[in-house]
């Protein structure tokens, strides 16, 4: 993607008048895609990952760590100046992200299966961080005790607290985009798309976004978020916070809290559209399970949370639904008549429907297809759709879709576009997917079904085909872990793609939604039970409640046995069990990738969230009040920096990874 082109994003008062047009044209573009690409066959299993990093300022004089919002220039440099050779040389790419302190990085071109040596992915990941970190380090000021680092933290623990961003006077001017009482607009990417997106979501909703995260309860924890305060810059937004914040919860009021957190995503190309649908369906229940075991976000806005993951924070942070759509009373009825927020037009108001979930949320519908195990009744949740879009997708002369696929897109297209560029209003149906992608890519679900473009006719093998993206994971501190999680999912994908009509992945969607709630619980890996299939071979969708340890390690329905071993046996890498890789001369590193996940699943090793929480609650400055003070946060970031750089001088690596993995990593550095 590189950098975003300049352009003029429309404010909500103009964007809202173009919604029908964007949706209608977007769907025509999608039909053209199906017409062009539906018959693609035998696309190779290409795949790739995306890592999101934070730039952080460490100030040793002040003993403080802040997100760095002043050196975002390095991202521009990497994409536009002679620094670009660093990307080419290292086969990596850098992309903008929502946070001005964030950088997204991907491999330059997708991987082909696992057809490379066992350090390849981790090495590519490491080069991304080192390149960014090296450029950023040029701004270090040792004389002032200032040092800059690039780290893969899921949530910056103090984001939105006092002195959590590195500009001098963030509050001597107003933050009109988010209107947050905590986050200055300087956390938002400078490209005008991002502040406009922030404002448009708020305006459509008719209120600031509002996220109440359960607060971790310790001996001296106050009964409410004591950082909420009264202000009178913006009427009515400033009047909302005291009403919106709930006792016992951390209150967050801006898109930046969610979109300013980092994740690990992986995308896989399926051989054809039918297999892409099957892959999508198969990965749906892996999302909550893998979210739980990737948990890496124990603190928000300077408070310890009573949960371990970022997911519902982002979900709430981009929730553009009006109070009517959410089926709640507006916070301030006087300013939000009938709870219809920024929906102005009478016709649009009449079309509003109740919508149970944010546009950033768990998957809504199985895609189905021709595979023998799918049954439409497994889509058993309340999922509103756009009837007009459904009808068009089913009945047209371009490329009629079947009901289940049509319903998927008809659901995505209940959403409005919250980002329209004046220059992009007129698009060609046959060559552009701009309007389609506008709605599609702002439906942020745990799994994303990624159709290709109209260029992807069957003979155009160099153009990407039908892909599926796995999106739930909190990002991990080290490349070792991020490679491990990516490869783990990759192996699941291989098994799925070789098991069409022999593997039955289906369970009721309502159970998957329930799993997603369970995955948010603190230490759900250790303490909770999730819905998991009793077996993956029979016709049935029967499930039981299983611990994460059982879900990974059970003999007949566990992930290691059913998915990982199967993939490795298919490759002739093992005879029976992944543990044989320990003795492998060529794939030993994969043993440690799998061991990491196995040990976290069994509770032998902590999740990142558990580890960081322990660090905070045992820190000498911690007052049993759930607060992550500046000094605790500073030491925590230093700890994360040591782990990221595999520095075991304080024994951190051994504590985090256990002795065996730590020793392997130190001996086999990439
Ligand atoms: P997005 O932000 O929309 O998810 P990105 O371009 O940032 O997309 O990342 C997409 C990921 O997909 C990257 O890791 C990239 O390497 C990978 N990728 C690119 N082409 C293909 C393909 N044909 N099949 C599978 N993955 C691909
Ligand atoms: Mg991306
Ligand atoms: Mg993206
Ligand atoms: Mg991203
Ligand atoms: Mg550095
Ligand atoms: Mg992505």
Image (spheres, rainbow, N blue to C red):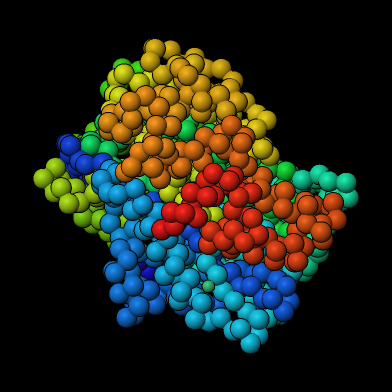
* Position of residue 461 in the picture relative to residue 662 (left or right): left
* Position of residue 110 in the picture relative to residue 530 (left or right): left
How many numbered marks are there?
0
The furthest residue to the bottom: 143
Q: Can you say whether 568 is above or below 617 in the image? A: above
Kindly identify the residue that appears in the image at 59 percent across and 84 percent down: 141
* Position of residue 552 in the picture relative to residue 228 (left or right): left
Which quarter of the rendering shows the C terminus?
Answer: bottom left
Which quarter of the rendering shows the N terminus?
Answer: bottom left
The quadrant where residue 511 appears? top right
Q: Position of residue 491 (x, y in %)?
A: 36, 36
- The residue nearer to you, when weighing 670 against 150, is 670
The quadrant where residue 365 appears? top left
Kindly identify the residue that appears in the image at 65 percent across and 29 percent down: 528
Kindly identify the residue that appears in the image at 63 percent across and 55 percent down: 652
- The residue nearer to you, when weighing 475 against 160, is 475
Q: Can you say whether 141 is above or below 5 in the image? A: below
Q: Can you say whether 349 is above or below 354 in the image? A: below
The furthest residue to the top: 539
Q: Position of residue 664 (x, y in %)?
A: 48, 49
Residue 246 visible to an observer of this rendering: yes
């Amino acid at each position: 993607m590189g950098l975003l082109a300049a352009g003029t994003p429309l404010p909500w008062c103009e964007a809202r008048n173009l919604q029908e047009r964007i949706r209608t044209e977007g769907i025509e573009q999608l039909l053209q895609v199906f017409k062009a690409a539906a018959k693609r066959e035998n696309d190779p299993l290409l795949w790739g990952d995306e890592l999101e990093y934070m730039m952080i300022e460490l100030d040793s004089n002040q003993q403080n760590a802040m997100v760095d919002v002043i050196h975002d220039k390095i991202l521009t440099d990497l994409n536009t100046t002679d620094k670009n050779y660093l990307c080419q040389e290292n086969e990596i790419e850098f992309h903008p992200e929502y946070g001005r302190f964030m950088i997204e990085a991907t491999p330059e071109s997708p991987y082909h299966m696992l057809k490379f040596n066992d350090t390849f992915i981790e090495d590519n990941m490491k080069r991304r961080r080192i390149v960014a970190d090296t450029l950023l380090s040029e701004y270090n000021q040792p004389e002032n005790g200032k040092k800059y680092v690039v780290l893969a933290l899921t949530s910056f623990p103090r984001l939105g607290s006092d002195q959590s961003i590195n500009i001098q006077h963030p509050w001597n001017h107003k933050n009109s985009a988010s209107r947050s009482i905590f986050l200055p607009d300087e956390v938002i990417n400078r490209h005008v798309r991002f502040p406009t997106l922030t404002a448009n979501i708020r305006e459509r909703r008719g209120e600031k976004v509002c996220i109440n995260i359960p607060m971790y309860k310790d001996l001296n924890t106050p009964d409410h978020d004591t950082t909420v305060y009264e202000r009178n810059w913006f009427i009515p937004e400033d009047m909302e916070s005291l009403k919106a914040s709930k006792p016992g919860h951390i209150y967050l009021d801006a898109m930046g809290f969610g979109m300013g957190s980092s994740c690990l995503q992986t995308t896989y190309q399926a051989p054809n559209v039918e297999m892409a649908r099957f892959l999508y369906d198969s990965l749906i229940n892996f999302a909550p399970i893998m979210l739980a075991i990737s948990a890496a976000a124990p603190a928000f806005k300077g408070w310890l949370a009573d949960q371990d993951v970022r997911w519902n924070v982002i979900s709430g942070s981009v929730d553009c639904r009006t109070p009517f759509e959410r089926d709640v009373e507006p916070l301030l009825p006087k300013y939000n008549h009938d709870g219809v927020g920024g929906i102005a037009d009478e016709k649009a108001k009449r079309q509003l429907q109740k919508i149970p979930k944010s546009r950033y949320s768990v998957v809504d519908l199985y895609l189905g297809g021709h595979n023998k195990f799918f049954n439409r009744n497994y889509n058993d949740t309340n999922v509103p759709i756009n009837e007009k879009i459904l009808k068009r997708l089913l009945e047209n002369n371009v490329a009629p879709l079947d009901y289940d696929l049509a319903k998927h897109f008809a659901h995505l297209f209940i959403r409005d576009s919250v980002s329209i560029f004046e220059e992009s209003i007129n698009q060609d149906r046959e060559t552009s997917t701009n309007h389609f992608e506008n709605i599609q890519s702002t439906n942020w679900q745990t799994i994303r079904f990624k159709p290709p473009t109209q260029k992807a006719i069957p003979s155009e093998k160099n153009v990407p085909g039908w892909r599926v993206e796995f999106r739930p994971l909190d990002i991990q501190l080290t490349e070792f872990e991020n490679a491990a999680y990516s490869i783990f999912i990759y192996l699941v994908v291989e098994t799925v793609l070789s098991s069409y009509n022999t593997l039955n992945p289906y369970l009721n969607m309502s159970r998957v939604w329930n799993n997603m709630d369970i995955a948010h619980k603190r230490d759900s890996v250790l303490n909770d039970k999730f819905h998991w299939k009793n077996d993956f071979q029979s016709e049935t969708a029967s499930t039981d409640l299983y611990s994460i340890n059982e879900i990974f390690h059970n003999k007949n329905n566990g992930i290691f046995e059913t998915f990982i071993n199967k993939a490795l046996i298919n490759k002739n890498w093992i005879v029976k069990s992944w543990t044989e890789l320990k003795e492998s001369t060529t794939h030993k590193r994969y043993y440690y990738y799998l061991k990491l996940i196995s040990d976290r699943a069994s509770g032998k090793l902590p999740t990142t969230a558990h580890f960081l929480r322990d660090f905070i609650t045992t820190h000498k400055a911690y007052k049993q009040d759930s607060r992550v003070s500046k000094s605790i946060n500073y030491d925590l970031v230093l700890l994360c920096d040591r782990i990221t750089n595999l520095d075991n001088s304080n024994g951190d690596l051994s504590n985090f990874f256990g002795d065996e993995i730590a020793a392997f990593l130190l001996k086999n550095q990439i």
